[in-house]
Image: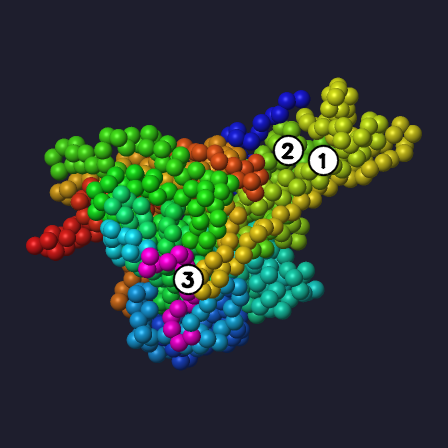
Amino acid sequence: MNHLDIIGKSVPRKEALEKVTGAATYTNDYIEVGVLHAKMTTSIYAHAKIKSIDTSEAWKVPGVRAIVTGKQFPYLTGAPLEDRPPIAVDKVRYYGEPVAVVVADHEFQAKRAAEMIKVEYERLPVVNSPSEAIKSTAPLVHENLGQYRHFGDVYPEANTNIANRTKIRKGNMEKGWLESEVMVEATFSFPQSDHAAMETRCARAEILPDGRTIIYSASQSPFIIKRSISRYFNISPGKIIVHTPLVGGAFGGKVAVQLELIAYLASRAVGGRMVKLVNTREEDFVTSPVHIGLDASVKLGCTKNGKITAAEITYLFDSGAYSDRAAIISKAAAVGCTGPYSIENVWCDSLCMYTNHPYATAFRGFGHSEFTFVIERTMDLLANKLTMDPLALRLKNAIAPGDTSPTQVPLNASKIGDLPKCIEKLYRLINWDEGQRIEIGKNKYRAKGIGCFWKTSNTPTDAGSGAVLTFNIDGSINLSCGVVEIGQGTKTALAQIVAERMKMDVNYIHVMMEVNTEANPEHWKTAASRSLFMAGRAVLAAADDAIQQLYRTASIVLRCSPEDLEVGAGRIFLKANPSIGIEINEIAYGYVYPNGNSIGGQVIGRGNYIMKHLTELDPNTGKGNPGPDWTVGVQAIEVEFDTKEYTYKIIRAASVIDAGKVINKNLAYGQVTGGMCLGLSFASREAFSFSNTGIIQNQQLRTYKIMRLGENPEYLVDFVETPTSEGPYGLRGLGEMGVIGIPAALANSLSAAAGVALNQLPLTPELIWKTKKGDQRDRI
């Protein structure tokens, strides 16, 4: 039969009906009889010593079963740097940090008791930005940094606020500056913000009489939770079971392991009974991990014709009070520090800085939208100084096969894709020819800005994934893997990959949506735009394994060699004569002859994948291979700007991305447009407002602004397909790519419209007005 060509088609999502009917269940939807409830007492200061904790009044509240403080588990957690107690011990390092946890029969009782705990503090000086944190006179957020355990390529610096420093040293900087005929320098900054997923973080924990620990969590990394609980509490990993059902959005914020540890401690305090811990929206903003902030400086040099010869870059990431994933985010930014450009001479220091802000974790793009904003703004400044078209400058310097990355990886088409083709497609898509800035009325201008980007995964060098396929009696297939469905549609795309390999209708592929670490094969975590890449390879291997088993049995029944057989449409048949064959459902559980004799047995397809040829980075030069390939692309924003009112409207947002191979067109479009919306919201309005004492002022959705229905522009999305040899069917990671270049593109469009360099986020009318007025005063 002919190839069904499932890959590339817009197959409806497997969980769509559950979600649109409201039947889908999430972690907090489960109601258990007798479950206890936990609520946290959190710090009212950003930096203070804990002098005493008085729980006497809290114990008087009816229904209180236990009160847990940091003294009951005075150990540090975290990866790759162990620097964070689950509940604060001796001092607090950010506003909202957990200080005590109350367990009670009902949530309102736990909340009332938590509010009655009296904590006496001795306030300490606050570190309120990464630029403050790096000063030699800055207070130390972690006095014992030099004593913390750490793993992998993370390099904390004792007696400083530097949790990690990643160095990139490529080429010869002296030579690069000597060849530079035109140079630009600039500084950039933006504060922390939030993930603002629809579902707030939540977890349940239970310890059974036989010692088994059951965790239910809205998480992107259930297998990391399992490892963490095992490690920190010395429990055999075989006795830890983590359940993750559907997750109501995450954007990286549910990679961190936080509430799960607290829920476990709470359950242990009440003899193992099930305890539920659910964040309010305010707690999700200030107590759980947030989106990282950044201060940065860049210097670029180039020849008169626009060829970049040198780049000197410093990134100071606002990790907040603890390092968590921020230590790896700073590394990821170093890996891609220059953006997708061929630059022979590069010097970069990317630092993870402690401050007295909430601690940061992964956010969609994992540091790439942050440093891309910095680099792409500098590219526009360089283009202005050269009086060169910004798009032409990027095309001239675009990374290409034969170049090397900042970490000195030799690049080919499989590794790097085709950025010039993406740029050429975008040129036509947004009609760049009509001009970057056009007057459309009194005090009104239309302007366009662009931003190129690239991203590799920065996963652990041994990150892996597994998959298992089993058959039903009708020949349909059950797919089991450890990928979490967080709204991205990966499990639907995985079903397409299996259907493509088996040449059968995708409706015959049934996917287990909930992740159960006891039953599902392990998957590293659902992050880094690597789930479909890794699990896709695993399910392909599982399909091939199942097919070979089917061939062996069918070859006996059909009296031929396994090499003579083909699979398709639910059958195994002869390549030379497809009319001769057997239905899969007749052999998936073994074949029974008319006399009762049986051969074969149950077919169970097993597959796995592990990252290959990756290396750690050299600590002195940054040389190393951080990922199997890069996804490249270019994005553009068109705005209407009022030069009198300093207000603007976003008209169009466009993306062209080299996806390697698009597996599901509608899902790919939804992924990219969703990312673009997130990027626009982050760039135009989202930000925490900190007081001088480090306290977040906008802790609610009424005061923390996000993009809302009706505010979205027209979205234009197109793809280039340059297959990568490592990805299943040539696909590249796509999940994060929609967001990465958008903040830069918006800043570049508004800078062109307003006639002033906008190097801060978010891009509010007030910021544009202040920058413009300051610019005018400077010129006077």
Q: Amino acid at mark 1?
A: Ile
Quickly name the residue at label 3. Answer: 167
Q: Position of residue 612 (x, y in %)?
A: 59, 50
Dot 2 or dot 1: first in sequence order is: 2
The answer to which of 431 and 402 lies nearer the viewer is 402
Name of the residue lying farthest toward the right = 595
Mark 1 residue element: helix
Mark 3 residue element: strand
The answer to which of 467 and 305 lies nearer the viewer is 305
Quickly name the residue at label 2. Answer: 501
Mark 2 residue element: helix
Image: magenta residue range: 158-175
Q: Quadrant of the C terminus?
A: bottom left
Q: CA distance from mark 3 to mark 1?
A: 47 Å
Image point (47%, 38%), residue name: 659
Say whether residue 427 is left or right of residue 441.
Answer: right
Q: Position of residue 294 (x, y in %)?
A: 34, 58
Q: CA distance from mark 3 to mark 2?
A: 43 Å
Q: Amino acid at mark 2?
A: Arg
Q: Does any portion of residue 690 appear in the rendered image?
A: yes
Q: Residues within 10 Å of mark 3 (few under 14, many from 20)?
A: many
Dot 3 or dot 2: first in sequence order is: 3
The answer to which of 348 and 587 lies nearer the viewer is 348
Say whether residue 758 is left or right of residue 40.
Answer: left
Q: Amino acid at mark 3?
A: Lys
For the residues bearing labels 2 and 1, Cβ distance under 8 angstroms: yes
Q: Residues within 10 Å of mark 1 (few under 14, many from 20)?
A: many
Image point (40%, 56%), residue name: 171
Quickly name the residue at label 1. Answer: 547
Q: Position of residue 438 (x, y in %)?
A: 19, 34
Q: Locate residue 221: give its quadrant.
A: bottom right
